[in-house]
Amino acid sequence: MNTAGVTQIIPQGIEYIRILPEILLSLSGMVIMVLDPLVDDRGTQKLLGLIALIGSVAAIAATLYQSQFPGLGFWGMVKVDAFSTFFHVLVTAIAAVVILSSFEYMQVQQIRAGEYYGLILFGTVGMCLMSSAVELVLIFIALEISSISTYVLAGFRRRAAISSEASLKYFLLGSFATAFFLYGVALMFGATGSTSISVIAQALRSGPVPVLAYVGIAFMFVGLGFKVAAAPFHIWTPDVYEGAPAPVVGFMSTAPKAAAFAVLLRVMFESNAPGRLWLVWVTAALSMTLGNVGALVQQNVKRLLAYSSIAHAGYLLVAFAALPNNGIPAAMFYTASYAAMNVGAFAVVSHLAGAGERYVSMDDYAGLGRRSPVLAATLTIFLLSLIGIPMTGGFFAKFYVFSAALQANLVGLTIIGVLNSAVGAYYYLRIIVVMYMREAREELPAIPVSPALGAAIGISIAATLYLGLLPGRVLEYASRSAAELLH
Amino acid sequence: MNADKWSPVILTLVTFIPLAGALLLLSLPRRDRDIRVFSLVVTLFTFVLSLHLPVHFHRARSGFQYEFDHSWIPTPNIHYHLGVDGISMWLVVLTTFLTPLCVLISWKSIQERVKEFFIILLVLETALIGVFVALDLFMFYFFWEATLIPMALLIGMYGHGRKVYAAVKFFMYTMIASVFMLAAILWLYAKVGTFDFVTIQNAIRSGQVADFTGAAQWLFLGFFIAFAVKVPLFPFHTWLPDAHVEAPTAGSVLLAGVLLKMGTYGMLRFNLGLFPDQSRANAWWVMILALIGIVYGALVALVQPNMKKLIAYSSISHLGFVVLGIFSFTQAGLDGATFVMLAHGVSTGALFMLAGILYERRHTYEISEFGGLASSMPVYASFFLFVVLASVGLPLLNGFIGEFLVLSGAFQARAVYGILGATGIIWSAGYLLWMYQRVFYGKITHPVNETLPDLATRERIALLPAAAAALVMGVAPLLWLNAIDPAVQTALAPFAQLASKVVGQ
């Protein structure tokens, strides 16, 4: 600790700018919590949603402002760099789009939604911190902030037993996983004498790697592997995704995942973690295979997308096995384009689900191409992107990941991945086939899409196509931040 | 001078005008007639525009023409690089030629979701043209995959019978196969650092690619599998009959006329162009598969009770000729293979249109449902006979030239290949003429057939260009071959060196 006086212990003004997005998000979240009991009328629930939306957009603006002041803050616990900016923007943008897509859903489901928006914002605070924290204890706290919010969000359809089941399952297994992570942090501290990533990196580089460090890394990997739903820590995913409210699934399948991947990238690459390769290799191959094979037999669209998200975690992990200067940008690009297509897909799913989420089985999608051609077309674009068809973000995402893997001479893993993406095509295609080529069994009512949901879907489509047609700028930014991360 | 000004943009225009038309269609109101007329205008305009290519093509020059190269994405290094040589140019024209005919032939048969149908058709045209003009491996893959979705939708939404099964089978077969090509492309990119076809080709030829010798065989196979499924080469052909039988007429025409040629074009351009040594080493089994395809396709065609399935199997047989010609590595063989691609596109396209016309009237393809049609539909019968004769390879019609060249190439490579291949011609005469006899001659066996209306003016307009093209191609093949020849010579240049190397030793 510094002895130069109180002024150096108390954070400087600029250091607050380095957590400005988190501050703004927390403030808006608290305003919502305070207002929630005061506004009782269901019509004014929209007001709270609007505050949440404004809060998250303000956080994006703050992030952009903050990116002009790169550097460490709060005794070297937070770091603003291009890497953190990337994930801040991504996570808050996901939150904003999910909030937009929740307006209609909450009305249809008749759920009092006040604290829902607050929880999304608090969760986002945790995720933002995860991407900018460079100290393991803060990472752990951020992880907990984000996790606890998502546990509650998963159970938000209080009247549905399946939703409470999802929440409880997620909570029990999730706490177990965070405990693993914490244990890993402790072991790492034992091995290197520090919880700061840069100090750990130096310690690991300078001398022989202690066995404890291997174990520590492995435990942290287990904890984060749970958060990103990578096999073999994926068992919870289908049940939780099936039970949780559809927009929440759109949120928790992308934002916490992106943040957990950000942590993994920092921990694995910046600290030059030992024994990384085989650990990631096995997990990646398992996730891709189990995810895709599991998805083949699903009838429930949400469960299908849950298995798909396991598979996508696997593709993403392939990038971790690659060399850092190709792997990091590839992984970052993947999180972004996966977020765009999956949030969009769940926005459509949440609309089609109807009151009480009755219509989430594959058969309910029959004849959608005729019933509401625009929605069917948008869902098709998201699904094609999930398959990885050219012109969509999903294509370049896979493309960068696999070419990074090939540059690291991981031919075996690439072939497993490429074959898996061919298998994956089948079940996404099934949904498209059902929508366009099957007749509806019963005439389902076509609910008009509300403007807010339309905007959410529109943003997702635009992002998916932008990443598919002009991926250059995003990738370039990701490469730059990767270079910064590795110095 | 004026032509030179156009030459960098002409390929972009030809490729994307159909897509622009599709986007415009999106905003048009659902008045079916207007939509049909609009699609016809767009496709005709594209065709006329594409005629710029052969008219201003420098026939004496080898290498790519009308090139346009512009950086698209900096990392990875992807270029928007278009260009054609004598081979791909004619395939582009074939595509633009067949699409307006598809619009005409779908005029009445598509009555539901008309707007979507023509949007899909136009998007498909863009993707097909793109495959032939792309000179960047990435762009090529991009268009290659992009053809899949509209085609699968055409089959699945507008087909009949087990259409969904056929669409999914088609999609999965080609998707899984092309994944191997993607892996090979990625490997090349990882080693060479570019997707540019010409740059990669030069790098391989000058031996600058690290680890190439070990990987070359796998790369060859990666590309080959993707193309072989598309062709389709025996034993990867099982998706084709299903897809054809269930597809709407326009889908069949484009599937047989153009989509299958993507495979043979790919073999010619990429397998031969990038991996000459491996092509030569693998030629023996490829040619055997091609021969099996020729004979097997013909034999199965012979026993088909379903007219459309018969034509589908005949395609397997004809495409076998193309593969045989390509892997003979002779000037005649490659010239012939390219010519068969074009000729088969025109005549099989016409055959599918004719089958579709009959289906519109009777809603069946069963040959046994017909008989004696020559008396009730004389004009139709004579068109049909003309196309059948073109397809079986009657001299002075288009089928003859290509097959003759392929066989003479195959003889040069190894006599037994030529002999076995030649039986394919006999078979094709057998199954087509027998089918013709059963459908058109004899007495009318089903009373419904007595009153079938003959060809309408619109149908005649759709068929006439195809028939005329079959005749002109047969009478004046040099119009086509003099552009194909230099391209084939370029493609064969490494093989000549290989041969001389062998002789030198």
Image: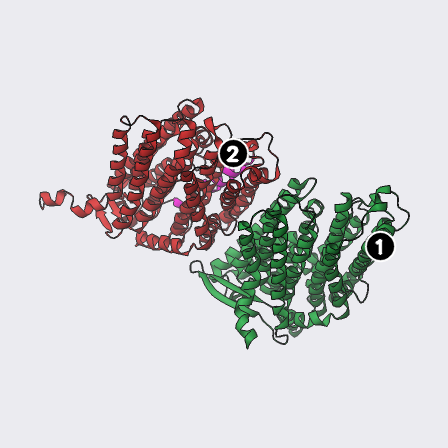
Report which colour depicts chain A: red
User: Does the magenta run of residues contain A412?
Assistant: no
Q: Are marks 1 and 2 in contact (CB under 8 Å)?
A: no
* Residue at image location 24% in from the left, 43% down from the top: A20
Do discs 1 and 2 belong to a common subunit?
A: no
* Chain in green in the render: B
Between A40 and B348, the residue placed more toward the observer is A40
Residue at image mark 1: B378
Kind of residue at disc 2:
Ala
Q: Where does the image place residue B213, in percent across and percent down from the top left?
A: 55, 61
Label 2: which residue?
Answer: A446
Q: Does residue A180 appear to the left or right of B234 in the view shown?
A: left
| SS under mark 1 | helix
Q: Say above or below: B98 vs B372.
A: below
Q: Which percent across, then down, holds residue A99? A: 37, 37
In the image, A69 versus B130, the foreground residue is B130
User: Magenta: predominant secondary structure element?
Assistant: helix
